[in-house]
Image (spheres, helix red, strand yellow):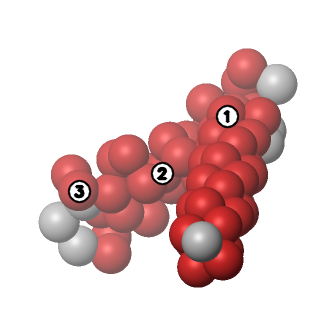
Amino acid sequence: MAIQKILIEAHSIITLISFVTFIGIVWWSYFRKQPKDFDEAALSPFADDQEQLDKVKAQLDARERHHG
């Protein structure tokens, strides 16, 4: 009986830790105001080399300055 109680408590603690971790990831990804980083990461597969990646970064910077 004691082992079952310990296992139930362990399951509850692991579930709670997982939930808090999930909420932290959601908060980090949606509520942090850094869309520039996400835009850059989204476009990086299309950049073949460093020169093209720098060009994309410059376009993102220009767009950010234009939109404020």
The residue sitting at 70% across, 43% down in the picture is 23
> Could you tell which of marks 3 and 1 lies nearer the N-terminus?
1
Q: On the rendered structure, is 20 left or right of 29?
A: right
Quick one: label 3, few (<14), some, or many (20+) residues within 10 Å? few
Q: On the rendered structure, is 49 left or right of 58?
A: left
**Which is more toward the observer, 63 or 3?**
3
- The residue carrying mark 2 is 40
**Which is more toward the observer, 40 or 19?**
19
**Which is more toward the observer, 37 or 52?**
37
Q: Position of residue 47 (x, y in %)?
A: 24, 59
What's the amino acid at mark 3? Answer: Pro
Of helix, strand and loop, which one carries label 2? helix
Q: On the rendered structure, is 33 left or right of 11?
A: right
Quick one: label 1, few (<14), some, or many (20+) residues within 10 Å? few
Name the residue furthest bottom: 3
Q: Quadrant of residue 15?
A: bottom right
- Tell me: residue 67, above or below residue 37: above
> Could you tell which of marks 2 and 1 lies nearer the N-terminus?
1
What's the amino acid at mark 2? Answer: Glu
Residue 57 in view (yes/no): yes
Label 3 with label 2: CB-CB less than 8 Å: no
> Could you tell which of marks 3 and 2 lies nearer the N-terminus?
2
Q: In whole angstroms, how far apart are the C-alphas of marks 3 and 1?
A: 22 Å
Residue 25 in view (yes/no): no
Q: Position of residue 62 (x, y in %)?
A: 63, 38
- The residue carrying mark 1 is 30
The residue sitting at 21% across, 52% down in the picture is 46
